[in-house]
Amino acid sequence: MGRAPCCDKANVKKGPWSPEEDEKLKAYIEKYGTGNNWIALPQKIGLKRCGKSCRLRWLNYLRPNIKHGGFSEEEDNIICSLYISIGSRWSIIAAQLPGRTDNDIKNYWNTRLKKKLLGRRKQSNVNRLSSTSHDPKDENGSLDDSCEPVLSNSALERLQLHMQLQSCQNPLSFYNNPALWPKLQPLQEKLIQSLQFLNENTNYTLMQHVLPSTQPGQEHKIDFYEPPNTSVIDGLNIDELENSLNAFNAGSSQDVMEQSNNEGIQAVSTFQADLDDLLHNKTIGLPPQEEDPIAEFDCFKAMDSSKDSMIWWSNDFELKSASTNSWDSSSPVLQSHGMYQDYGLGYNLQ
DNA sequence: AACATTCCCAACCGCACTAGT
DNA sequence: GACTAGTGCGGTTGGGAATGT
């Protein structure tokens, strides 16, 4: 049984707002405010609109000091930094950009910024087809659509961005310089320790893919945790580890809020240098390779060709996280051992 | 010029959370 | 504590505009 609709769907107007409707809504709110009741507001004004629709129209377009379009490089950096750090928490990201709305940033990310950073999937696929395929089902090296990994877009994008940063191989870059890493909370440190324990004392094996590069001697290495063949992990208190993971995950949502409220973008500001290089096509350690701004991100191609190896955990991940945010604390996915791999990727535990 | 495809973004939908009763 | 209404959020969609063939 679903919840009751917020309004009478049959008697509300849908679609684009007319100037008259805008004027009515704006005039009323500027004079009387919203009255803390969006549902009742359209009836007071005489608008045949859903209260939620009125709220959205006001927040995204009619309220003062709203900016549209013309995102600056600095704003690009902030959006990317926060997306890598916290994912698609658009409202939190918007809170760091005065005058920007979550809807605007979401649209901007989905239509432009994402492509700027990650490139078109089709282009990546073309690159992948010309590289090695490990899929035994397809002897021609092509990738059947039915075999596409089902890792969520958000998760995949964030992984790709992580990989991008990780592959820069600059001794001064974020991932190679612990001094730049964000200060970890006790739970986070415990998680890292647990992962190190996994690495050193269990049948979980830290595997490393060495992926071909267009540049000789610059192969890309991708770390991931291979699950053990047996269900028994000697010497490891799995419950404790999972509790650490769950507690960490549950805490992360609060962290995000606190980060937003107290520290803003500072917590992720250490990404800025690398991101600036990514966004504006500056080179970090690696020489320029191709004119194509997409192709020059060689690690993306590597990422694409490595996705087959990630299916073992992405299936579980995707099914359980469904349409919710991939890092949502309510998701049971962190109970899956497969999640360890992501942290292994992110923190490069070697 | 006509049609097809892709891009872009405003708006909608449904779920989760919160406050009030 | 249970229920309900209101709110906020993120994902998705519809359709016009721009671009390609």
Image: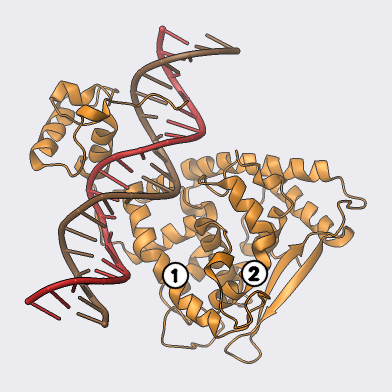
Chain colours: A orange, B red, C brown
In this picture, is A96 found above or below A287? above
Amino acid type of the residue that numbered disc 1 sits on in the rendered structure: Leu
Q: Residue at x 59, y 69 (%)?
A: A163
Q: Is residue A173 left or right of residue A340?
A: left
**Residue under pointer 2:** A308
Q: Which mark is residue A197?
A: none
Q: Residue at x 67, y 77 (%)?
A: A134
Q: Residue at x 59, y 72 (%)?
A: A303
Amino acid type of the residue that numbered disc 2 sits on in the rendered structure: Asp
**Between A84 and B8, the one nearer to me in the picture:** B8
Q: CA distance from mark 1 to mark 2?
A: 22 Å
Expressed as whole percent of the image width and height from the top left, the position of residue A238 reads 83, 45
Q: Which mark is residue A117?
A: 1
Q: Please check whether the numbered discs 1 and 2 fall on a single chain.
A: yes
**Between A22 and A71, the one nearer to me in the picture:** A22
Chain of residue at mark 1: A
Contact between marks 1 and 2 (CB within 8 A): the answer is: no
In this picture, is A101 found above or below A12? below
For the C terminus of chain A, the image quarter is bottom right
Q: What crowding class fits label 2: few (fewer than 14 Cα within 10 Å), some (14-19), or many (20 or more)?
A: some
Chain of residue at mark 2: A
Q: Is residue A277 left or right of residue A190?
A: left
